[in-house]
Image: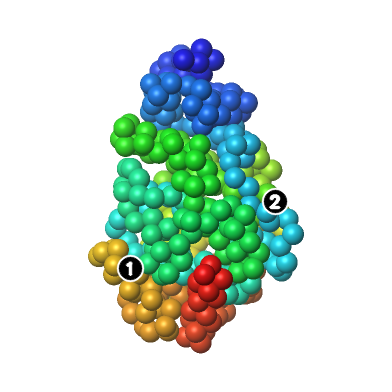
């Protein structure tokens, strides 16, 4: 048992009147002790649920990210020959269960247009046990689970797209996954994963979220860590997928902006996209729909793909406005260029 960790646990778990927040260094130390299993399982479980009830502060989240940076994997991104910064897509690790995701095709659209993309995640996990991105990629013919971290860096450099598979590349974090089921709630680490970057250099972090206060929470965390290029998205099921059924709430952080942060609202009906979001009928149907879209065939998923692809092309600097982004996303799909990118990746991994 770690006596030091016990003191951190007592500090955050003492209740509303006597409990206190951790400093950034304390949060980093506590996270390292959990990752390195220096704290006991009882201590870890108690810490995660106590922090869930208390709610972490931006300072604590910054400390947790410090620990992830110290102990986690790092892709080599400092010598990439791209005209645009690496974009890291932060998506809930416990997957999707209600709406069909389009994130993999969005990533392919960006890579086709010259924007390098990094994704990260693992297998099915609590609390949702939803469809994870890595399984969708496998359905599309790309298995990122067998790659070494060096190979992940190589495919990013050559193809402009990669995936950090946490069970293989960040085992220290993956061994904490069972606690999600045991405590029955998403722990604070679920927030860490949304804004963590497994890259060696500065990147553009695009993170999804569910609850409105998270937008401010993430913004403050980025400020503490000196991250000035980021996008937060109140997306479908906490992902970065923009909804068609409601206004998208976007937080934009960019060093070129004045002010450096601003909120941006996108009303899908203003661009002819107002309709229902596509329900997730089955894992097989998700992949089949994506394969049709990649062939340029119109189906229920196509509007969401174009809507998201166009937004991301605009936000990443490829297009000067949203309408141009939507048009370019559609052209890249119907002309077969996105499908070609997928086949290039498949061939590269053979």
Nearer the observer, 17 or 301: 301
Q: Quadrant of residue 47?
A: top left
Residue bearing mark 2: 201
Residue with the mark numbered 1? 286
Depth check, front residue: 116 or 60: 116
Q: Is disc 1 surrounded by few (<14), some (14 to 19) or many (20+) residues within 10 Å?
A: many
- The residue furthest bottom is 335
> Does any portion of residue 333 appear in the rendered image?
yes
Q: Are marks 2 and 1 in contact (CB under 8 Å)?
A: no
Question: What is the C-alpha distance between the residues marked 2 and 1?
Answer: 34 Å
What residue lies at 59% left-to-right and 45% top-to-bottom? Answer: 73
Q: Nearer the viewer, residue 201 or 23?
A: 201
Could you tell which of marks 2 and 1 lies nearer the N-terminus? 2
Who's the residue at 33% across and 79% down the image?
A: 299
The answer to which image quadrant residue 178 occupies is: top left
x and y, in percent, of residue 74 in the image: 63, 47
What residue is shown at x 56% (from left), y 34% (from top)? 64
Crowding at dot 2, Cα within 10 Å, few <14 / some 14-19 / many 20+, comes out as some
Tag on residue 33?
none
Q: Quadrant of residue 88 in the image?
A: bottom right
For the image, the number of numbered tags is 2
Is residue 19 placed above or below 190 in the rendered structure? above
In the rendered image, residue 151, in percent from the top left (x then y), is placed at: 59, 58
Give the residue at the far front of this rendering.
Answer: 350
Report the residue at 58% width, 41% height from top: 72
Q: Closest to the observer: 195 or 224?
A: 195
Circle 2: element type? loop
For label 1, the SS is helix
């Amino acid at each position: 048992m770690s006596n030091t960790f016990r003191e951190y646990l007592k500090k955050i778990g003492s209740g509303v009147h006597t409990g206190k927040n951790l400093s950034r260094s304390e949060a980093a130390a506590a996270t390292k002790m959990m990752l390195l299993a220096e704290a006991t399982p009882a201590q870890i479980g108690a810490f995660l649920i106590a922090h869930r009830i208390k709610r972490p502060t931006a300072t604590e989240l910054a400390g947790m990210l410090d620990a992830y940076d110290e102990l986690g994997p790092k892709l080599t991104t400092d010598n990439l020959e791209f005209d645009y910064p690496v974009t890291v897509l932060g998506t809930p690790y416990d997957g999707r269960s209600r709406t069909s995701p389009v994130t993999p095709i969005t990533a392919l659209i960006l890579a086709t247009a010259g924007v390098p993309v990094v994704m990260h995640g693992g297998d099915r996990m609590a609390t949702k046990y939803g469809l994870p991105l890595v399984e969708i990629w496998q359905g599309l013919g790309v298995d990122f689970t067998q790659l070494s971290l060096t190979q992940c860096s190589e495919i990013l450099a050559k193809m402009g797209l990669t995936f950090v598979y946490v069970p293989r590349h960040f085992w220290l974090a993956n061994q904490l996954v069972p606690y999600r089921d045991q405590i029955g709630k998403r722990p604070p680490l679920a927030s860490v994963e949304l804004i963590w970057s497994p890259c060696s250099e500065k990147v553009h972090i695009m993170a999804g979220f569910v609850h409105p206060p998270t937008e401010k929470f993430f913004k403050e965390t980025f400020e503490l860590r000196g991250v000035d290029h980021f996008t937060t998205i109140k997306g479908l099921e906490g992902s970065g997928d923009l909804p068609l059924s409601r206004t998208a709430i976007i937080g934009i952080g960019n060093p070129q902006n004045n002010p450096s942060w601003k909120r941006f609202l996108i009303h899908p009906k203003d661009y002819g996209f107002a309709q229902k979001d596509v329900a997730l009928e089955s894992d097989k149907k998700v992949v089949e729909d994506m394969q049709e879209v990649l062939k340029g065939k119109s189906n229920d998923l196509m509007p969401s793909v174009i809507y998201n692809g166009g937004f991301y092309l605009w936000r990443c600097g490829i297009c000067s406005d949203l309408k141009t982004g939507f048009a370019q996303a559609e052209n890249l799909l119907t002309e077969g260029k996105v499908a070609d990118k997928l086949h290039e990746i498949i061939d590269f991994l053979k």
